[in-house]
Image: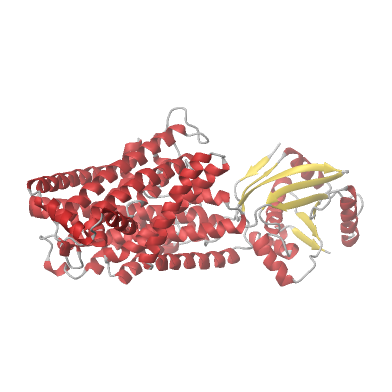
Amino acid sequence: MSTATAPVSPPAPERPGLRAWLLEGLSDRATKIQGPHGRTTGEEHRKPWWRVMCLTGVDYFSTLGYQPAIAALAAGAVAPIATLVLVALTLLGALPVYRRVARESPKGEGSIAMLERVLPWWAGKLFVLVLLGFAATDFLITITLSAADASAHAIENPYAPSWVDGHEVLLTMGLLALLGAVFLRGFTEAIGIAVVLVGVYLTLNAVVVAVALAEVAAHPHVVGDWQDLLVAEHPHWLGVLGMALIVFPKLALGLSGFETGVAVMPQVKGGPDDTEDRPLGRIAGTHKLLTTAALIMSVFLVLSSFTTTLLIPAEEFGEGGEANGRALAYLAHEHLGNAFGTVYDISTIAILWFAGASAMAGLLNLVPRYLPRYGMAPRWARAVRPLVLVFTAVAFFVTWYFEADVDAQGGAYATGVLVLITSASVAVTLSARRKRQRRLTVFFGSVAAVFVYTTATNVVERPDGVRIGACFIVAILAVSIASRTRRAFELRAASVRFDPAAVQYLREAAKSGTLRIVANEPGARDAKEYREKAREVRLDNDLPAWAPLVFLEVTVTDASDFETDLVVKGEERFGYRILRVASSVIPNTIAELLLEMRGLTGAIPHVYFTWTEGSPFRNLLRFLFVGAGEVAPVTREVLREAEPDVGRRPRVHVS
């Protein structure tokens, strides 16, 4: 016989008014996630891979709105060559890496979870927190940069009212406020909307690129002018290639689509033989999603960079120029007229705004996935609306700080993207090495080295990205440490289960009228240890020899974990009955099990401790970081917070 329970945290009392609305869904935050990346529970809710590709495409493909202009501004005449280098890295580096990530994290956990498994204990947690800082940089700058570029398209449209000119910051903040309002109200699944937006946007871009190529063919001298400029700036082709290798890290913006592509994996419809442990159909669909999106984007990047560099005067890419942050829109208006250009602008504004929605949903999935589980976020971080308010406020600040400038935010965006891709390449390299796949280890290691170079180059060229990422990292670490300390006395079990032997021992011991539990720190686990411990407890607490004792031994596994599944196993050694359990912390686990024993047997448990030797302050630090330390008083404090009724609270005895 066994018994299993859900987490035993006491239900939150009803909260009236605004507080109740903000914290709506707090208790079930782990299973109900809103937004485009929200998890679904059944295969019937999942969609074909090509439809889900449009969901990640609102982030990936929308970068066409600003990527060609940023490339031309950063690389000048070398932009098409630098874009070719970026495409080669995309298809030969990032794509194989994320196909491997998809195979090893089919539930959408991504490369961060892969690295979390490689690095245990606090080192792994701290590393994940640093990566979360860069991930937050990536997603938040996606929101602010996309909104800023949408504002630029709106302001530069010839039909835009004159009063919006010069108010880029206010217009961008208005779009951000609208985005926040949508998520506060509740954002449902949006794959259908994404399919329409991506379909229309890619069609319009195909028209613009086709017309631009026709213009180049009709005026071949522009190719000669471009070649002459290249030769004038870099007389030898090695100089051109070297320049392309130097500047292409500045163009690594759209690569964020790969991380998004893995995040939406739970939405992909699998095969009929798929299981949760072996979702081969879902993995195959995600591989098609990633490959198709990369090929489409690569073609558009090469053609758009080539045509915009040849057809748009260089001065128009600079600050105040009509092509700044909107190169393809410039071509649409210039060669297809303002009517078509306006339709293109509307489509671009819509998909850029929706890219912000996709990034917001990514944040709402990412933060609750890690921080609350680590005990490094307040309980309200499991609710959607408070997080939306926090992220929107940060987006306001970033927009104000960068003055809604697309070019100024490119460094921070590229840094966040490149750090995540570098971590993914390192994760798959370690995975291949662990599985003794030598050729793949060398290949992925080479890709990782290229991305390390790319990231380092971007950091040197644009250190503002690291500064912004560092701000997010420091904020996350500060909140995490404060939260972990504040939540130290909470019940932490994700679930509790007693095996049949444990249930039998507890119920038979409770028949005596009192359930007596001896907390024992396991040592040699021989007959002498249990005999002396039982004699000491009976003597110090004046317990009769006939009173049955049940030993409880908690073994700390990974003290850096916060929530763990508790499996209590009964064992008899040398005539003594023992309950054994592995956990991340001793006092909270003992308190949790005492409350469960009360429910199982109907008796109020009595637990017996021996005082811990050493400095109380040092023991408190041991409790916070090692999971042990001052066990008896901490157990009592956890019980006091968990059970307000003194009459029903388990009794704690210390000698």
Q: Residue at x 49, y 41 (%)?
A: 440
User: Where is residue 365 drawn, in percent x and y?
Assistant: 44, 52
Out of 91 and 530, give the one closest to the viewer: 91
Q: Residue at x 42, y 30 (%)?
A: 271
Is residue 219 found left or right of 609 in the rendered image? left
Q: Quadrant of residue 165?
A: bottom left
User: Where is residue 102 drawn, in percent x and y?
Assistant: 45, 41
Q: How is the image coloured?
A: secondary structure
User: Where is residue 528 drawn, in percent x and y?
Assistant: 90, 51
Out of 336 and 432, give the one closest to the viewer: 432
Is residue 247 found left or right of 532 in the rendered image? left
List the single residue furthest toward the top: 272
Q: Is residue 189 visible?
A: no
List the single residue furthest toward the front: 236
Q: How many marks?
A: 0
Is residue 274 found left or right of 351 in the rendered image? right
Q: Residue at x 87, y 58 (%)?
A: 537
User: Where is residue 148 drawn, in percent x and y?
Assistant: 26, 62
Out of 199 and 311, give the one closest to the viewer: 311
In the picture, the quarter occupied by the N terminus is top right
Q: Is residue 3 visible?
A: yes
Is residue 143 found left or right of 6 in the rendered image? left
In the picture, the quarter occupied by the C terminus is bottom right
Q: Is residue 501 above or below residue 66?
A: above
